[in-house]
């Protein structure tokens, strides 16, 4: 979701896939743009992209880690863009390693 006529403000970090970008803002929200097949359309998870503390992208999808440890994904399903089925069937606990990155 692009705001202000194409300008995104208060950006803390930008992450890219092969054909899309996602910007994590200082308030913990995320804006994405570019080719929808590469994660450029986050509209179907936009209401979940709050309190985001980290974003990672691969070739075709993004994953956002939230402050409560949950993960939201979007982009190409074959590249991890839809984790909703996996998490429903196989719940996992996500651990944070701040010194890893």
Image (cartoon, helix red, strand yellow):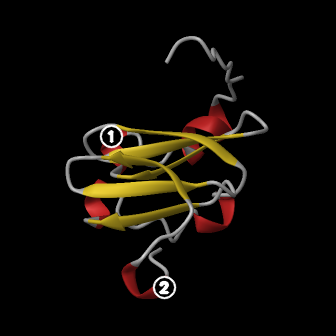
Q: Position of residue 100 (x, y in %)?
A: 53, 12
Q: Residue at x 40, y 67 (%)?
A: 41
How far across and down, in percent of the image, does residue 70 sit?
70, 38
Does the CB distance between marks 1 and 2 fall below 8 Å? no
Give residue 25's quadrant in the image. Answer: bottom right
Q: Residue at x 67, y 20 (%)?
A: 96
Above-or-below relation of 39 to 70: below
Q: Residue at x 69, y 58 (%)?
A: 27
Q: Quadrant of residue 10?
A: bottom right
Circle 1 SS class: helix
Q: Which mark is residue 79?
A: 1
Picture residue at 32% right of the left edge, 43% below the top: 78
Badge 2 marks a residue whose secondary structure is helix
Query: Could you give the CA–CA distance between mark 1 and mark 2, rounded to whole angstroms?
Result: 30 Å
Spot occupied by residue 14 in the image (x, y as percentages of width and height): 41, 49
Front-lying residue, 71 or 100: 100
Q: Mark 2 highlights which residue?
A: 4
Q: How many marks?
A: 2
Say which label, 1 or 2, has the lower sequence index: 2
Q: Nearer the viewer, residue 72 or 86?
A: 72
Dot 2, how many residues are within 10 Å of its Cα: few (below 14), some (14-19), or many (20+)?
Answer: few
How crowded is the residue under tag 1: few (<14 C-alpha within 10 Å), some, or many (20+)? some
């Amino acid at each position: 979701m692009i705001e202000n006529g194409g300008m995104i403000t208060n950006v803390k970090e930008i992450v890219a896939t092969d054909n899309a970008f996602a910007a994590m803002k200082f308030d913990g929200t995320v804006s994405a743009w570019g080719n929808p097949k590469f994660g450029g359309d986050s509209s179907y998870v936009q209401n979940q992209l709050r309190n985001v503390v980290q974003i990672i992208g691969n070739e075709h999808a993004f994953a956002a880690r939230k402050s409560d440890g949950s993960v939201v994904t979007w982009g190409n399903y074959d590249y991890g863009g839809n984790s909703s089925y996996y998490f429903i069937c196989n719940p996992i606990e996500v651990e944070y390693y701040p010194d890893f990155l």
